[in-house]
């Protein structure tokens, strides 16, 4: 007999082994007045009574653990406050020489949960739900064509040799709230000819088969109904967290709880079961099977093993990143990992050693990436305050303070922190972010794991002195040929991680850029300001992309002014950028294609000799396969020659255009950079739509969407316009005052309602168009409020973030 003392409780455990291998425990409990024992209960329903032969005695938590195991047993009667006193038995399983548990003769699940139900004999059960014949497969083999008689009760799923009254029971699967059912699927029926249902239990998994679909559905519904009727099962860790919350203002009780419950403190032993309850089976994360995940319970145990490896790892960053990635892929594990880290940072023998601080470093990264659920968050904050009070002026105190501040700012991240960010967080520092802006300029600003795009935009405005600008700025992800605006609430650390993982394009890499977003006032910008440079550079980007409608002469003049502003006066020794950085490439291609439209002579004028007719008829003509291969080869060769000729013509035409640009450049000798920029913008402003952002869309001409036309949708400060590509005049314009609503109609369709007209556009830029229109609407409302200083009916009461204004309903 082994005897253990719990706070306020004297527990004696007597284990008696019979010759038949069955075990029975007799627990004698005497209460003292030194401390009230924890009194959580397993079942929520106070009036719940255990059904015949069943009582929820134990959880599988730590029953294989060498350090400790907990067995929870509810009393027959509850106290007046609805919470019955609960016996918490701390037992140390003993192992035999072959590694088996000394009391493992009876199946563990039946030993833990089934007390009085006999192993043999089919008796009448008033709680019977469903009964019938089912097939059960044999592990590692094909379906054995042998039926069993299954009986579903309110507590278990049993199967017998046959339906006779005295038939032998072959197995039992106890049903709790953590069990799960997989419904029948067509794939199994196609492969086996049987409809299958799978029931996951604590230690067993029953795969049951029947030839009738309705019967399989009936069983699945009945089993799921029994599972849903069960009260939630709580683990010892959950019960102790609740007791800590209730006694957090009683230091003596808290000390007793931590002293007598090793499950709350650091351990070097492995974990054999999760600290929090997870459903049996693998239903909750089947969408991540491609990444090799198993059940949530198994993954929780694996994560704890990874945590323990941190103490000996030479480089902890890969392990930390792996744990964070698992928590990102499997959100239910986040609370579990937080509980494991709280456990490993409590009661450590050597708290300030580098090995132990690895747990604090991972906890720091977790706190800057994910937030736990409300109960675990309270427990975590209590733990941090406790550590700060017990270990002041230590590294643990510094980490606890940093984590407490991070928890106030953290929102769930979209990406796992990069290596650079993890290394910075391990040292509780900020990281430097490089932001590029139009022209060759860039700057580095400090950011944290919580810095948003709006916050970084404000820092950039202060850094560049643009706080008083009437225009609106934003951050972009940009490469040589593509760019995407970043939402104001987006975490910058996620953007940097995303950029670092993107594959670089052929001639450039992705970078973070700060640019003009809404062109609200382009006339009153001083010529010597940074904002004027922004306007000039972004106007040139639009021209090179072909989004500035102008004649070819004006485009060549703009290219010459660009060279003068970049390099100065012409010199034979001055290198200049390639043509595709000065002039829109589609113009050169259009000239070449126009010159190639003249009819070309055939490759050969020699008539093809025909084979003489044969005397006998054949099913297939001679040389049919050879002729087909020859025609395919000839067509391929002709296309290759055409492509080669086209590239040659493009190169020749490009040299001609570049020569014209250089001649114009020579005529600009003596012009300063500011004068060249001013002349450039003067020509660009001749386009009536100057300042609008163009998006390529397919405009549906008919309401049914059967006819469409490729157009430009221009979003400007005061209106939305439609342009034919390359034309300066708008086909139609819709001032914002006429727009009743706008938004996403379906996955690729954007809808604008102007008056009694519905305009439908198909585009891949749905989010960008909606964000920009939101920003212009917000700016217009803000200007009206500033002018009138009153709130108009239907107006905005506040100014939302530029890119986060909610879209108008469709």
Image (tube, grey):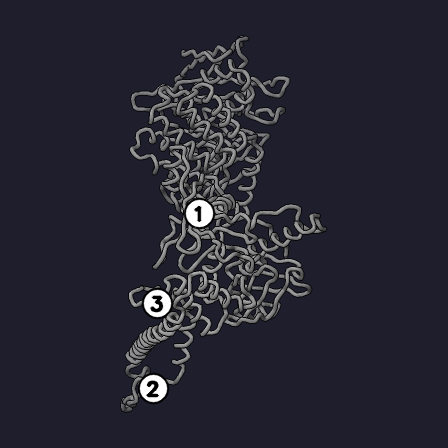
Q: Can the viewer see residue 104 in this picture?
A: no
CA–CA distance in space, label 3 to label 2: 44 Å
Label 2 crowding class (10 Å Cα cut-off): few <14, some 14-19, many 20+? few
Indicate which disc, 3 or 2, sits on the residue closer to the N terminus: 3
Q: Is residue 746 above or below residue 178?
A: below
| Residue contact between numbered discs 3 and 1, judged by CB atoms under 8 Å | no
Residue under numbered circle 3: 570
- Whether residue 597 sits left or right of residue 524 in the image: it is left
Residue 495: give its label: 1
Which of 473 and 163 lies nearest the eye of the viewer? 473
Label 1 crowding class (10 Å Cα cut-off): few <14, some 14-19, many 20+? many
Label 1 sits on a secondary structure element that is helix
Q: Can the viewer see residue 580 in this picture?
A: yes
Q: Where does residue 228 sit, x and y in percent of width and height?
A: 57, 36
Q: Quadrant of residue 809?
A: bottom right
CA–CA distance in space, label 2 to label 1: 55 Å
Q: Residue at x 36, y 26 (%)?
A: 356
């Amino acid at each position: 007999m082994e005897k253990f003392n719990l706070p306020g409780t004297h527990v004696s455990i007597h284990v008696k082994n019979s010759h038949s291998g069955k075990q029975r425990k007799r627990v004698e409990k005497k209460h003292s007045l030194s401390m009230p024992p924890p009194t959580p209960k397993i079942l929520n329903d106070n009036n719940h009574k255990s059904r015949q032969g069943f009582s929820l005695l134990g959880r599988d938590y730590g029953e294989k653990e060498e350090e400790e195991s907990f067995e929870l047993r509810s009393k027959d009667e509850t106290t007046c406050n609805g919470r019955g006193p609960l016996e918490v038995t701390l037992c140390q399983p003993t192992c035999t020489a072959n590694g088996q548990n000394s009391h493992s003769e009876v199946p563990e699940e039946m030993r833990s949960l089934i007390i009085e139900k006999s192993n043999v004999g089919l008796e009448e059960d008033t709680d019977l739900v469903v009964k019938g014949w089912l097939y059960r497969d044999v592990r590692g083999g094909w379906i054995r064509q042998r039926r069993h008689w299954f009986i579903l009760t309110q507590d278990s799923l049993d199967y017998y040799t046959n339906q006779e009254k005295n038939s032998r029971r072959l197995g039992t699967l106890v049903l709790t709230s953590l069990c799960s059912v997989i419904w029948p699927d067509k794939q199994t029926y196609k492969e086996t000819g049987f409809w299958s249902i799978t029931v996951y239990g604590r230690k067993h998994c029953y795969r049951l088969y029947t030839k009738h679909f309705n019967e399989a559905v009936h069983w699945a519904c009945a089993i799921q109904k029994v599972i849903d009727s069960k009260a939630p099962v709580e683990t010892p860790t959950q019960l102790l967290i609740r007791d800590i919350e209730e006694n957090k203002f009683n230091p003596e009780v808290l000390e007793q709880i931590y002293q007598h419950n090793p499950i709350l403190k650091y351990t070097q032993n492995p974990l054999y079961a999760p600290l929090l309850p997870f459903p049996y089976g693998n239903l909750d994360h089947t969408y991540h099977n491609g990444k090799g995940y198993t059940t949530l319970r198994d993954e929780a145990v694996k994560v704890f093993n990874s945590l323990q490896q941190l103490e000996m790892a030479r480089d902890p960053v890969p392990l930390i990143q792996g744990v964070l990635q698992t928590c990102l892929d499997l959100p239910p594990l986040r609370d579990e990992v937080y509980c494991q880290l709280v456990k490993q940072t409590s009661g450590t023998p050597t708290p300030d050693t580098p090995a132990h601080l690895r747990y604090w470093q991972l906890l720091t990264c977790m706190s800057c990436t994910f937030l736990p659920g409300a109960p675990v968050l309270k427990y975590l904050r209590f733990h941090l305050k406790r550590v700060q009070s017990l270990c002041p002026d230590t590294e643990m105190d510094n980490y606890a303070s940093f984590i407490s501040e991070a928890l106030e700012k953290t929102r769930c991240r979209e990406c796992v922190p990069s290596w650079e960010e993890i290394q910075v967080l391990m040292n509780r520092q900020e990281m430097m972010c490089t932001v590029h802006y139009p022209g060759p300029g860039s700057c580095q600003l400090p950011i944290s794991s919580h810095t948003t795009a709006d916050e970084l935009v404000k820092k950039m405005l202060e850094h560049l002195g643009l706080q008083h600008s009437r225009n609106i700025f934003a951050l972009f992800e940009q490469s040589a040929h593509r760019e995407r605006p970043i939402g104001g609430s987006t975490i910058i650390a996620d953007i940097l991680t995303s950029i670092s993982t993107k594959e670089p394009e052929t001639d450039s890499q992705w970078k973070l850029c700060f640019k003009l977003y809404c062109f609200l006032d382009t006339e009153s910008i001083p010529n010597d300001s940074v904002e004027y440079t922004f306007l000039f550079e972004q106007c040139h980007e639009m021209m090179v992309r072909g989004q500035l409608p102008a004649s070819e002469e004006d485009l060549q003049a703009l290219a010459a002014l660009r060279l003068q502003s970049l390099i100065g006066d012409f010199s034979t020794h001055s290198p200049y950028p390639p043509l595709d950085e000065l002039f829109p490439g589609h113009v050169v291609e259009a000239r070449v294609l126009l010159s190639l439209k003249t009819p070309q002579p055939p490759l050969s004028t020699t008539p093809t000799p025909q084979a003489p007719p044969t005397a006998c008829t054949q099913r297939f003509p001679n040389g049919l396969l050879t002729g087909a291969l020859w025609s395919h080869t000839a067509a391929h060769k002709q296309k290759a020659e055409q492509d080669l000729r086209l590239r040659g013509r493009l190169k020749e035409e490009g040299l001609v255009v570049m020569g014209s640009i250089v001649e114009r450049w020579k005529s600009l000798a003596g012009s300063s950079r500011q004068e060249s920029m001013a002349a450039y913008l003067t020509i660009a402003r001749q386009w009536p739509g100057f300042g609008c952002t163009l998006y390529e869309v397919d405009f549906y001409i008919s309401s049914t969407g059967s006819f469409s036309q490729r157009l430009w949708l221009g979003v400007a400060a005061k209106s939305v316009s439609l342009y034919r590509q390359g034309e300066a005049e708008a086909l139609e314009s819709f001032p914002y005052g006429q727009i009743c609503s706008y938004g996403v109609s379906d996955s690729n369709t954007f809808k604008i309602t102007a008056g009694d007209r519905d305009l439908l556009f198909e585009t891949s830029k749905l989010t960008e168009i909606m964000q920009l229109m939101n920003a212009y609407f917000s700016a217009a409302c803000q200007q009206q409020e500033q002018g009138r200083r009153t709130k108009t009916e239907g107006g905005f009461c506040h100014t939302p973030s530029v890119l986060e204004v909610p879209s108008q309903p469709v």
